[in-house]
Each structure stands twice: as structure tokens, then as C-alpha cells.
């Protein structure tokens, strides 16, 4: 902190500093000195120099506050038994000087806020024009034309202040973009109308083809039904003929089968009879051989031929008890 800058507003002698900070109201004359400087100062916000002087004196008041604050801090450290009085004095000086600083700076602060508001008004207006064209491709013709009229109505001139060139560029850019968007929207509308016309034409063509197809289908169905009826009659006649042919063939087959069966039955009976005859002949021959062998045995045993034959006959016919011939 510059001592020269502080001394321009206030100086507290070191030998009286303790009394000043420990006696109620003793700081006020020094604050009054600062107040006198403030009251004598005539702020001029209209020029850069004037605004600089406002900031300078506000800075000096802030320096004076820091100067008094630091003296108070040093005294508080030296005299711990008097912290409450000193702190109260510090607060009084701090609050007073903060208020005076704000009072001195108020014209500049108000100007800065007004300047900020003014600039924001311009930047918001420029942003609004930019936003106007951001969603243009998605809008209908009427909305686009309304926006174009709104943009065209914006006056670019002295009221735009230092942003006049920005307004001019933004307005022209918006007009160009909206004009292109309107042209595209018009073309899109024409394209949609053409597509609708083609769609209706295609729909009519498809309906005509459908009706023609229905007519052909009905004609083909009628013809098919007539052909089917005629075919059915032909098939019925063919079926009747085939049935008669099958019945005839069936009768002939059954007759042939009956004849074959009768023939087979006759052949089977004849074969059976022949087999039986052959069996009887073979059995007779077999028995004859055994009987002749038995008779020969009797003869060899001393019987004459007639008695031997008679004995074999008696045994063969079972007339001799407990005696038999095994054939």
C-alpha cells in the first residue's frame, strides 16, 4: 500500500493511535477528513478520465480503510486487554469506509451495470436473429415468411451503437437463410403435391387393374365351372363304363377262379386217391412180404405150406391170443 496515497486522505500519529482506537468517537475526526475529500470530489462519469478519477478515489478510500485496519490490528495485538473496544472501532471504521467507498463508486458501478445491460440487450438481439434461422429447415412456409418479415422489419442504424455492423451482418445472414429455406419449402410443397398426384394416379391404375382382374377371374371361374360340369359328365360316363367293365371282368374272373378251384379240387382228390391206392398197395406188399417170411419160418419149423399160411392168417387177424406180427 502506498503511504502517499493514504496520507492524502488520513494520517493517524503513532503516539495517539492507541487513544484514537480505545476512545469512543476518537476515530471520527479522521473519518471526517476522508469524508471531506469525498464531499469535495465532483465525479464525472461522461469521460474516461472522469471514470478513472472515480475509480482512483474509491481505491484511495479502500487504501485508507486498509491503513486504519492495519493500525487497529497492531494495537489489538499490543493491547490484548482491549480487543473488544478496538474491534468495535475497527468495525465502525470498516463499515463506514465500505459504505463511503460504495457511495463514491456508485456512479461508476451504476454506469457499469447500465453498460452491461446495454451490451446484453444488443447481444441478446443478435442471438435472437441467429436463433431465428437455426431451425428454419424444419418450419413450414408461413412460419418462415413470418420470420422473414420480422427480420426485415429490424432497423439497422445509430440505435445499434457500436454493434451496427454486427446487426447488419446478422440481419442479412438471416434474410439469406430464410429466403433459401422458403424456396426449399416451396419446392418441397410442390414435390409433395406431385407425389400425391402420382400416388392417386397409381391408386386409380391399381384399382382399374383390380377391377379388370376381378372381371377376368369371374369369367375364368364361370368357364372353369362349365368345363368342370362337362368334365364331370364325361367322367361320370367313363366311370359308368369302367364300372360295367369291372363288373364284367369281375364276373369273368370269378368264373375263371371257380373253374380253376373245381379243377384243383378234382386234381387234389385224384392225387389223394392215387396216394391212398399207392399206400394201400405198398402196405399190402409190405404185409405180404412179412407174412411170407413168417410162413417160411413156420415151414422151416416143420409145418407144411398150407398149415404155415393158415397159421400166419390166424395170427395176422388176431385170432391167436398173445401172438401178433409186427409190420
Image (cartoon, grey):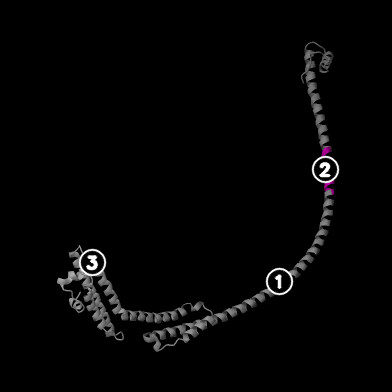
Q: Is residue 45 left or right of residue 242?
A: left
- The x and y percentages for residue 238 are 81, 58
- Magenta range is 251-265
* Rendered-image quadrant of the N terminus: bottom left
Instruction: From the image, tell me which residue sits under label 1.
Output: 213
| Any part of residue 19 in sight | yes
**Image depth: mark 1 or mark 3 in front:** 3
- Residue 85 bears which disc, if any? 3
Point out the residue furthest to the top here. 302
Magenta span contains residue 263? yes
Q: CA distance from mark 2 to mark 3?
A: 155 Å
Report the residue at 38% width, 82% height from top.
118
Q: Is residue 104 left or right of residue 239?
A: left
What element does badge 3 sit on? helix
What element does badge 2 sit on? helix
Q: Is residue 284 above or below residue 319?
A: below
Q: Is residue 154 left or right of residue 68?
A: right
Instruction: From the image, tell me which residue sits under label 2.
Output: 260
Magenta span contains residue 48? no
**Image depth: mark 2 or mark 3 in front:** 3
Q: CA distance from mark 1 to mark 3?
A: 112 Å
- The x and y percentages for residue 142 are 54, 82
| Front in this rendered view, residue 116 or 135 | 116
Instruction: Classify mark 2: residues with Cα within 10 Å, few (<14), some (14-19) or many (20+).
Output: few
Whether pointer 1 and pointer 3 mark residues with C-beta atoms closer than 8 Å, the reply is no
Q: Quadrant of residue 268?
A: top right
Amino acid at each position: 500500500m502506498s503511504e502517499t496515497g493514504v496520507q492524502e486522505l488520513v494520517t493517524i500519529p503513532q503516539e495517539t493511535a492507541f487513544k484514537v482506537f480505545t476512545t469512543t468517537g476518537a476515530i471520527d475526526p479522521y473519518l471526517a477528513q476522508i469524508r471531506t475529500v469525498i464531499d469535495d470530489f465532483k465525479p464525472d462519469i461522461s469521460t474516461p478520465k472522469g471514470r478513472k478519477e472515480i475509480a482512483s478515489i474509491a481505491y484511495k478510500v479502500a487504501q485508507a480503510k486498509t491503513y486504519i485496519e492495519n493500525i487497529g490490528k497492531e494495537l489489538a495485538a499490543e493491547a490484548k486487554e482491549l480487543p473488544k473496544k478496538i474491534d468495535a472501532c475497527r468495525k465502525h471504521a470498516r463499515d463506514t469506509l465500505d459504505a463511503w467507498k460504495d457511495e463514491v463508486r456508485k456512479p461508476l458501478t451504476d454506469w457499469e451495470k447500465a453498460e452491461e445491460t446495454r451490451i446484453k440487450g444488443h447481444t441478446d438481439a443478435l442471438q435472437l436473429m441467429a436463433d431465428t434461422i437455426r431451425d428454419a429447415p424444419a418450419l413450414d412456409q408461413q412460419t418462415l415468411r413470418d420470420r422473414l418479415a420480422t427480420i426485415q422489419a429490424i432497423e439497422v442504424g445509430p440505435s445499434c451503437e457500436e454493434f451496427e455492423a454486427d446487426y447488419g451482418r446478422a440481419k442479412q445472414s438471416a434474410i439469406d437463410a430464410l429466403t433459401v429455406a422458403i424456396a426449399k419449402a416451396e419446392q418441397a410443397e410442390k414435390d409433395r403435391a406431385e407425389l400425391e398426384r402420382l400416388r392417386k394416379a397409381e391408386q386409380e391404375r391399381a384399382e382399374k387393374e383390380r377391377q379388370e382382374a376381378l372381371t377376368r377371374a369371374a369369367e375364368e371361374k364361370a368357364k372353369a365351372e362349365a368345363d368342370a360340369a362337362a368334365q364331370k359328365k364325361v367322367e361320370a360316363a367313363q366311370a359308368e363304363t369302367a364300372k360295367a367293365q369291372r363288373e364284367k371282368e369281375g364276373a369273368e374272373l370269378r368264373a375263371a377262379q371257380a373253374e380253376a378251384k373245381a379243377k384243383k379240387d378234382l386234381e387234389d382228390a385224384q392225387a389223394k386217391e392215387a396216394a391212398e391206392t399207392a399206400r394201400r398197395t405198398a402196405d399190402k406188399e409190405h404185409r405180404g412180404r412179412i407174412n411170407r417170411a413168417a410162413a417160411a419160418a413156420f415151414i422151416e419149423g416143420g409145418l407144411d405150406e398150407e398149415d404155415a399160411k393158415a397159421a400166419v392168417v390166424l395170427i395176422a387177424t388176431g385170432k391167436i391170443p398173445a401172438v401178433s406180427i409186427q409190420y
